[in-house]
Amino acid sequence: MGYREIYARWQDNPEAFWMEAAKAIDWVQAPSRALSDLGDGRFEWFADGLTNTCWNAVDRHVEAGRGSQLALIYDSPVTHSQRKITFAQLQSRVARLAGALRAQGVEKGDRVLIYMPMVPEAIEAMLACARIGAVHSVVFGGFAANELAVRIDDAQPKAILAASCGLEPGRVIAYKPLLDSAIALARHTPAFCAILQRPEQPAPLTEGRDLDWMAFQADAPLADCVPVAGNHPAYILYTSGTTGQPKGVIRHTGGQLVALNWTMKNIYNVDPGDVFWAASDVGWVVGHSYICYGPLIHGNTSIVFEGKPVGTPDAGTFWRVISEHQVRSFFTAPTAFRAVKREDPTGAQVARYDLSCLKQVYLAGERADPDTITWAQNKLGVPVVDHWWQTETGWAIAANPLGIETLPTKLGSPAVPMPGYQVDILDDTGQPLPDGELGSIAVKLPLPPGTLPTLWNADARFHDSYLSAFPGYYETGDAGMIDADGYLYIMARTDDVINVAGHRLSTGAMEEVLQDHPDVAECAVIGVADTLKGQTPLGFLCLNAGCTRPEAEIVAEVVQRVRDVIGPVAAFKQALVVNRLPKTRSGKILRATMVHIANDTPYKMPATIDDPAILDEIKNTLQRNGFATA
């Protein structure tokens, strides 16, 4: 059965479609129905079922006789070490940690904040919470103290599980002082903290509050899995909000289990026992869905990678890990591939490794420009799939479902909507637009299982943020279009659609043209204020390593390319060459912040920024070219 038939099956009877998918999950009490309509745009999935996430991710594989299969492979080029953990070993380790948490008073419904680097213990912490029905909230390791304090006050965790430090190429990031400062700033105080002491930088423990990770588990009894309702929150994951107050996205237990399990075969084309690698971090939604839960629920081996695409030690580290651990499906961000391509444009590093195990690559997190996809396909010789989703949805809204059918690739498109998502392009009044017209991308309610049912303790904000703009729809905040074949094109965040003399133009479309230049490794386009036209586009170019051509020539060529491809209406006349672009730690380019700098308007330092010093470099470049004059 092909994609069209399966999508039509969902459309014809969503209830039956998802109840059938739910049969792949172990239930203590099977749900009597898939969907519950709570009114006012609120829905829940499998609410009256009883299940446990940890059982489905770990124990059931051991019970099925697959305990000796590897569950986790930890690969850390920054510590030059590896660890391999079987499902049976993971079951024992998680049950012990869960028992230790319970011995300290953590019970079903309590929140546990996790502040850890990319080590197996971070995954074990998430699973231990799930085992006893605690609600975890993972905060990216190394987050600033103030941002961590805000999340502590919102989630009000009974416990915090943290590491003494994290490791980056050439430096150690001390987590414990940040944690201590955050607790001092926060109004809420956790009952205790458990600290994983890393040998690279152990931390002094605060007497009466801090427990040693190993010592507090030493005599703890093993904890059994606690059944929870299908609508029990599995976790809270904070995403940035426009008010500066982060939004706590909730994921319900039953819907997440069903949806993620369905995606592993149908989208990512892996069978139980295959090795799956999502090169992300547990602090982001990809880490939740596709390092921890999705692969383990489906019975795959998941890789926990502590390193970078370049610099640990070189641009071949991805290929080394794939070859060494026999990765079948690989998931990363386009920005990671652009970094690799910039260092190794000819793909010399690829040729050093046997990649015959690799069958497909998936990109998400930023728009996957056609040049990057084409480069990766040419070098790797496998399908490179752009797919689109959000922290809020937890899994792909649109993708090429290779496990069902390999659809034709259309560069610039993440392909087609997945079952569960009816995607429409709306104008400002909420009316659907014809094929090929740019508008706001919205998803018809109800959203499918595994997506956010609301925000943590903020139902009104959930409605205002996502449901109020277009009644009956979830507003994605992205702009794009759908073509005559039903392929979706994500052109920009809604805020990145600029208005040039009355013409709505996509910065993403301009970026595609810039990225296609052979000397451009990475780029961004923003709209800056213009007294005559309202806004004009401004490009930023990062050039390939070793490029020796005059910058002025390259700028002139990309300006002409935009004029040739998009037309004079784009009014694209200026581009600046920079060494690097400001990004979040997950790889998203901070375009809105760059707009504020260029327009000399106030902005708040983004909490997720990878390196704040880059903003100074951007500001200096803008000032030299007549922008950001203050």
Image (spheres, rainbow, N blue to C red):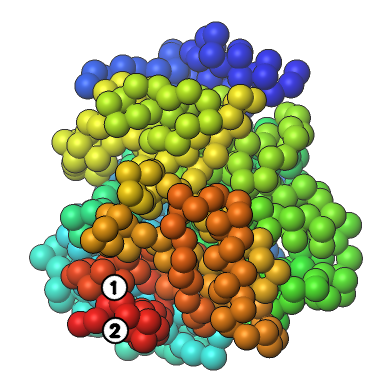
Corner quadrant of residue 159: bottom left
User: Which of the labelled discs sits on residue 597, or is there none?
Assistant: 1
Work out whether residue 339 can be spotted.
no
Viewer-closest of 584 and 54? 584
* Label 1 – label 2 distance at C-alpha: 31 Å
The label nearer to you, 1 versus 2, is 1
Assign the N terminus to one quadrant of the image: top right
Marker count (numbered): 2
Viewer-closest of 102 and 74? 74
* Circle 2: element type: helix
User: Which of the labelled discs sits on residue 482, or is there none?
Assistant: none
Question: Please, what is the three-letter code of the amino acid marked with disc 2?
Answer: Pro
| 113 versus 624 height, above or below | above
Q: Position of residue 153 (x, y in %)?
A: 17, 60
Q: Position of residue 63 (x, y in %)?
A: 66, 39
User: Which of the labelled discs sits on residue 177, or is there none?
Assistant: 2
Q: Position of residue 433 (x, y in %)?
A: 43, 24
Residue shown at the point (67%, 19%) measured from the top left: 4
* Circle 1: element type: helix
Position of residue 27 in the picture relative to residue 270 (left or right)? left
| Mark 2 surroundings within 10 Å by alpha-carbon count, few (fewer than 14), some (14 through 19), many (20 or more) | some
Q: Position of residue 233 (x, y in %)?
A: 34, 39
Residue shown at the point (74%, 21%) measured from the top left: 2
Question: Please, what is the three-letter code of the amino acid marked with disc 1?
Answer: Ile
Corner quadrant of residue 600: bottom left
Viewer-closest of 145 and 572? 572
| Mark 1 surroundings within 10 Å by alpha-carbon count, few (fewer than 14), some (14 through 19), many (20 or more) | many
Work out whether residue 551 can be spotted.
yes
| 7 versus 477 height, above or below | above
| 155 versus 142 height, above or below | above
Position of residue 226 in the picture relative to residue 458 (left or right)? right
